[in-house]
Amino acid sequence: MLKILLVDDHAVVRRGLRQILEEEIAGVACGEACDAAEALSLLAEGGWDVLILDITLPGQSGLDVLRQAKQKWPDLPVLVLSMHPEDQYALRVLKIGAAGYMTKETAPDELVRAIREVLDGGQYISSSLAEKLSGSLGGKAPALPHEGLSDREYEVLRKISSGQTVGQIADELCLSVKTISTYRSRVLQKMSMANNSELMAYALRHELVH
């Protein structure tokens, strides 16, 4: 039996994924989690063959789940399935250790192909992403300022650029306002910017938010 854990905060998405997988893969058994805590609890039970993970989760993000999963269960293939375009997160999740990155617009048969690819020990990446990887994972300097941010700094950048306040971000990420303010200061310093308006303009220009 093939066991796949589906982690997404939307029940309708999990239901749709389960239906696709049960129709296309014989003998598959799917577990479901709606947030990071539930996902890590189920992963700790063991026996999973593939983790299909969304990035945007309440509280801890999918990046946090991915990082912890690769630390504790390094051999577990993780396929990130996200609403965010490749340019926003794909390189980051692959550097952390994900076996593939797909957007939620992906056709069902492509999702099944990706699962089979990662089960065989391979990686699933698109041709456009493969081209970026040839340079970005080869130790070259970041081409754009935001590519030099840590994962948490990048997350804070995107949330600030979406119009969220420091307090709102702190509540959402279960961190203190002081901690988020520190991340904001680091982002401004690393990107040589003075305020949130400049961050927002940059994020919109580079399509980091929509």
Image (cartoon, rainbow, N blue to C red):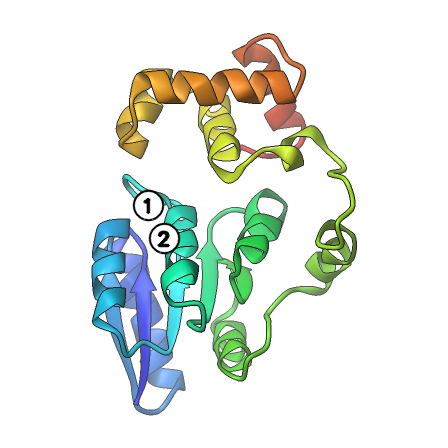
> How many numbered discs, if any?
2
Dot 1 falls on a residue whose secondary structure is loop
Position of 35 with respect to 102 (left or right) is: left
Q: Is residue 164 visible?
A: no
* Residue 206 point in image, percent of width and height: 67, 32
User: Eyeballing the image, is 178 above or below 89?
Assistant: above
Q: Residue at x 30, y 72 (%)?
A: 18
- Residue 204 visible: yes
Q: CA distance from mark 2 to mark 1?
A: 10 Å
Residue at the farthest front position:
72
User: Label 1 crowding class (10 Å Cα cut-off): few <14, some 14-19, many 20+?
Assistant: many
Q: Residue at x 55, y 65 (%)?
A: 100
Residue at left 27%, top 66%?
A: 43
Q: Is residue 108 above or below residue 116?
A: above
Give the camera-side residue of 49 and 210.
49
Residue at which label 2 appears: 65
Per the rendering, the mark at residue 57 is: 1
Give the amino acid at mark 1: Leu
